[in-house]
Image (cartoon, rainbow, N blue to C red):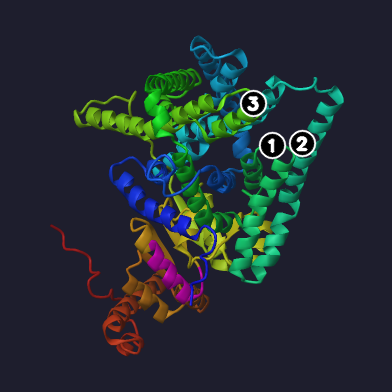
Amino acid sequence: MAAEAAPPFFAESIVFLAATVVAVPLAKRLGLGSVVGYLAAGAAIGPHGLQLLGSGEDVLHVAELGVVLLLFVIGLELDPQKLWRMKRDIFGLGTAQVLLTGTCLYAAARLAGLQHATALVAGFGLALSSTAFALQILQERGQLSSPYGQRAFGILLLQDIAIVPLLALVAILAPGPGPTTFANILSEISIVLAAVAGVILTGRYLISPIFLFLAASRAREVMLTAALLVALGSAGIMHAVGLSMALGAFLAGVLLAESSFRHTLEADIEPFRSLLMGLFFVAVGMSLDFSLVVENWMIVAAGVGTVMILKGGFLWALSRGTGSPNSDALRIAVTLPQGGEFAFVLFTAAVSNSLLDYQTANLLNAIVIITMLLTPVACIGLDTLAARVKARGVENPSIETFEEAAPTVLVIGFGRFGMVVAQILTSEGLEITAIDNRPDRIAYARKMGYQVYYGDATRADVLSAAGAGKAALVAMCIENYKVMGKAIDLIREGFPETLIFCRATDRAHMLDLTKRGVDFQVRETFESSVVFGRAALEALGTPLDRIDQIEEDVRHRDEERLAVQLSEGIYAGKDQLHRVTPRGQRRKGKQDAPAE
């Protein structure tokens, strides 16, 4: 009996997975990062390599969803207030970089013999950096939230916005039947504004109630489906009116940044984002034509050098001129000198509109890809230089700076216990993030002025998204000791340096937490009982010094009993329970030390 035909793209999927499994770990072992591994894998299996796969264009259309999901996740990490604080970096620094770099690259293209329209598209297309590439590098290094990482992100965000007028520029420069009328322009602007308003209103007033309803069902797959629907739906709306899909997804993410479901959304989207981002870079690598690069190696080499030196120089100068220290300016310069994925979109549109011929577009694409490959090398070079300077004992803040981050606390469980803990921590000015899996508690906490996020503490991805890796301390305030035990194991495995403070519901729970080696634990019933007993003795006329003596003795006997129970079981240690504290005596070990 003949075997049935394999599903579509089955063989291609196996080739893709096998190539990435080999190339990505090798690239990371060499210190080049996972992105270079994906690019190398695509170049090896593509039509210009081993020819195991055909053209990367079809794959690229699907893989571009990875960029969309990446911008959605980044948007989740920014609230509107924080985005507004970045306006100088976005519209000032970012705009200046695109205009200066694009103008100089345009002049270089003109000197190379390109026509005016062609040089304009090439120059400003190469002025755009790769959002996907640079953010991947920043995330892998854990520096996206650093000052220079935030400035780099502001520049990248402006470049994503800039693709819209650049695509319009291609349409204007293209030979056409006649000029566009003012009425048509006004109509297009109205449609765009209506789409943006629709996304904003939906994200602000409808999404959170919908997720609150879905969370009550406790069906994780439904929450996952809803998360993808929000990200891709907002991207689709923007794409329908001619804007960038990635920009639409980013806007939706920003609007949900203040939502209680922010961390769960991020954790649900992350696996799809990672897989599609890898596919995106593989598709880019597949488009690298080695024969074309070899035949025109001098042109490609000159283009790569010009782009990286000009863009890096402007990035450094503009960053320094707008207040960044030299160390941050250098890191921005070596993180963003590459060409970007939107250059492929721009060059493809230019070919379709007869502004670029096929060979010139391929040469420009090759320049973009090679600048991507060289960017991790530049980052490693700067790190090596900084390490050598530090090894010599030279204090050189122009190369390296160190900042102490303010301690943060992750509160897990926001019931009556967690709310009091949060009140104490925030009274000291500490930054807290709180998660809970009960929508009613989240709603109540919001009414009380607390920002609590929906999240399952037994999921490692949710803990990571909520900041367990960055937190100095995790406060376990939940009642379910099984959930707490699993969460403790996940934190100990993934974030071993994080302090774990736990609420114990009873004596057996406290014994279990002791065996798990948590850093601090407290039985809520024990402490409240001690306070209750003190108040009762005081009301009955017992002197305060006698009450203090009794409390000290009770606490000591409780510790002794716990030590016995750890080795002999929960029913051991009865002798420590019923004993009258002798009057006028301190317990053994607490006598005043003799004078020396």
Q: How crowded is mark 1: few (under 14 residues within 10 Å), some or many (20 or more)?
A: many
Query: Is 437 on the left-hand or right-hand side of 234?
Result: left
Q: Residue lying farthest top?
A: 111
The answer to which of 530 and 549 lies nearer the viewer is 530
Tags 2 and 1 touching, CB below 8 Å = yes
The answer to which of 189 and 328 lies nearer the viewer is 189
Task: Give me the residue at 57% from left, 64% from top.
Answer: 436
Residue of label 2 = 192
User: How many angstroms separate mark 3 from mark 2 (CA)?
Assistant: 16 Å
Task: Give me the residue at 55% from left, 62% from top.
Answer: 455
User: How many angstroms separate mark 2 from mark 1 (CA)?
Assistant: 8 Å
- Tell whether position 480 is magenta: yes
Rendered location of residue 90, percent (x, y): 59, 29
Relative to 584, residue 99 above or below: above
Q: Quadrant of residue 516?
A: bottom left
Relative to 145, residue 347 above or below: above
